[in-house]
Amino acid sequence: MRITVSVDGTTYTDEVEPRLLLVHYLRERLGKVGTVVGCDTSNCGACTVHLDGHSVKSCSVLAVQADGREVATVEGLARDGQLHPVQQAFHDNHALQCGFCTPGMIMQAIDLLADDPDPDEETVRTGMEGNLCRCTGYQNIVRAVRDAAGRMRPGAGPEAERVDQRSAQLSGGE
C-alpha cells in the first residue's frame, strides 16, 4: 500500500505492507532510531511519537494509519542546534539514567504540557504514567517536566514541533 506521511517536516511517500507498524517504518525505513522499540505491546511508552500533534505509542499504530498525517519524533525537536525546552530540561535535571525511555518520555511530556502548561506534580505523574522507566524513581523526570513548563511559552507543544516548510526545503526536505 502506498502512503504519504510528513515526518519531522519532511514528506515521504513509500510502499508499505499493510501490517507494518509505525515504529518499524520510522526506524527501518526512515532511520528515526530515536523512536525506540521497547515492549511491542504499548505498555512501556518508549516508542511514543506525535501523530497530528498528539502522543501515540507507535508500536500500536500501523504505518498506513499515518497516511496523510504529520508525525513528529524526538529527532525533529531541536531547532537551529538548540534543544527543545523539554529536552534541555531533561538534560539539566538529570532526568535519565540509561536513556532508553527518554525519547518517549520527552514526547509524552510535550503533549502533556500542550494540554496543561503549568501542571502540578500530581498532574505530571498522572500524565506520564503510560511511560515506564526501569532505572529511575521518576522524581527527576517529574522535576524536568515542571522545569520545562516554566521554560516554554504559552501555546508551545505541537505547534513548536512543526518545521517551517521553507527551512525544511533549505535543509533538503520537501
Image: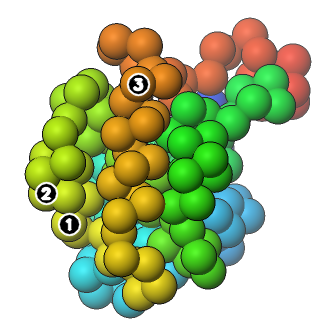
Say which quarter of the image contains residue 49: bottom left
Of 61 and 154, nearer the camera is 154
**At which x and y percent is residue 16?**
53, 67
Of 37 and 146, nearer the camera is 146
Of 37 and 84, nearer the camera is 84
Circle 1 residue: 129
Q: How many numbered discs sit on the rendered protein?
A: 3
The CA span between labels 3 and 2 is 19 Å
Would you say 159 lies left or right of 87 here? left
The CA span between labels 3 and 1 is 21 Å
Q: Which mark is residue 92?
A: none
Q: Is residue 8 visible?
A: no
Say which quarter of the image contains residue 27: bottom right
Q: Check if mark 2's residue and mark 1's residue have beta carbons within 8 Å.
A: yes
* Element class at badge 1: loop
**At which x and y percent is residue 131?**
31, 69
**At which x and y percent is residue 169?**
80, 19
Would you say 144 lies left or right of 174 here? left
Q: Residue at x 41, y 87 (%)?
A: 134
Q: Which mark is residue 150?
A: 3
Crowding near the residue tagged with mark 2, few <14, some 14–19, many ≥20 C-alpha atoms within 10 Å: few
